[in-house]
Image (cartoon, rainbow, N blue to C red):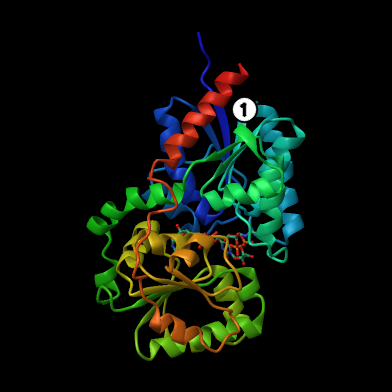
Amino acid sequence: MTTRPHILTIVGARPQFVKAAVVSKSMVDHDIRETMIHTGQHYDPSMSDVFFEELETPAPAHHLAIGSGRHGMQTGRMLERIEQIILDELPDRVLVYGDTNSTLAGALAASKLHVPIDHVEAGLRSFNRRMPEESNRVVTDHLSSMLFAPTTAAVANLAREGITGDQVVLSGDVMFDATIAASEIAARRSTIIDRLELTPGGYILATIHRAENTDDPARLESIFRSLAEVSESCPVVLPLHPRTGKALARAGLLDFATERLRIREPLGYLDMTRLESSARAIATDSGGVQKEAFFHQVPCVTIRTETEWVELVEMGWNTICDPRADEIARHIVEARAPEVIRSNPYGDGTASRTIARKIMGCVEGDL
Ligand code: UD1
Ligand code: UDP
């Protein structure tokens, strides 16, 4: 009798719920047994529960309820709890996603217990070590046994750091799989365009949450003044990340923002997908939203000094705009789709199947 492979998955933040939903379904199809840990890094219902409900992901077996805190404290608390669960569950492999503190804690815990690590979204680099995500990515990649890189640029980044060979798999991007799965359902079920009284193609969708933008009051003010300027010619809808809400309140800018922009609670994935697909343009500092803009063929302005998703800039779908620059509003208003449409660098929508198949092969190879 063969034993089913047992994978321990670690998630904790909003984008990980989206990525894990599609990979989990593929693991079921491959008869892989998955045990999921939710660290509780994100915990508001609109930042967590809604994704499990809408994407029909089974409730995690372990919910650690770690909550918010400074990096060391938050990561350390996760590490202690995840270590014990690995000792109890004895998984064949540990699966982590992206670059959050939950990713780092999962990778560290597994590595110390000599459990092989699979990293989805490996090889991304901003080359900006002041971003908390950059150290999480670098450490996780160097601890991982199997690295699922979404793009050829990610494969090249890993090669520059000496990570090559069969352990690196160009899988495509699981967020593309997720967008494909959600788009048709969102078009049928989401009523957000009517609820917000919007005209398709007649609004800008914006999201801002990166620490380097929210925690610097001058940058935060520059960004929100620019979005307010855009709203004079086109409505700007902005689902507000709790981090940004708190930062705006601290900076005395919350009233200014709510009076000028259509500020809303964080949205569920289906409403977000629907809003993205009909936006005239998207302005964001999110990693995931930059790519989703492209998946929906909507031009994007990234309000950061650099991006990990360099292909989007090369293809003309994305413009990088310094958060302190005067011309943010002009870039958003003038954002257009490129004249030459090139092929999709994020795969063919089967990344999650590739990942599940590879994981299955690794465990069988280990037996
Ligand atoms: C985290 C990730 C970031 C990712 C983002 C996705 C790290 C270091 N950062 O950033 O890479 O892009 O998630 O959204 O892991 N808060 C709430 N309710 C919640 C969650 C957070 O109020 O459910 C507030 C708290 O005040 C908290 C702050 O948001 O201190 C920041 O949350 P945290 O998870 O530390 O970082 P994010 O900015 O969400
Ligand atoms: N998202 C969402 N509702 C929102 C904002 C974002 O469903 O109000 C989704 C978005 O479509 C994408 C993911 O959350 O799938 C991106 O998460 P986020 O921007 O928080 O993190 P990042 O990708 O920057 O790490």
**Is 226 or 10 nearer to us in this picture?**
226
Q: Is residue 187 above or below residue 208?
A: above
Q: Tell me residue 163's x, y (percent).
A: 68, 41
**Is 360 or 294 nearer to us in this picture?**
294
Q: Which residue is mark 1?
A: 91
Q: Residue at x 34, y 64 (%)?
A: 297
Answer with the quadrant where ligand 1 appears in the image. bottom right
Left or right: residue 245 versus residue 141 is left
Does residue 124 appear in the picture of this structure?
A: yes
Q: Tell me residue 23's x, y (percent).
A: 46, 40
Left or right: residue 261 versus residue 241 is left
The quarter of the picture where the C terminus appears is top right
Left or right: residue 367 versus residue 187 is right
Residue furthest to the top in view is 1
**Is 163 or 22 nearer to us in this picture?**
163
**Is 151 or 213 nearer to us in this picture?**
151
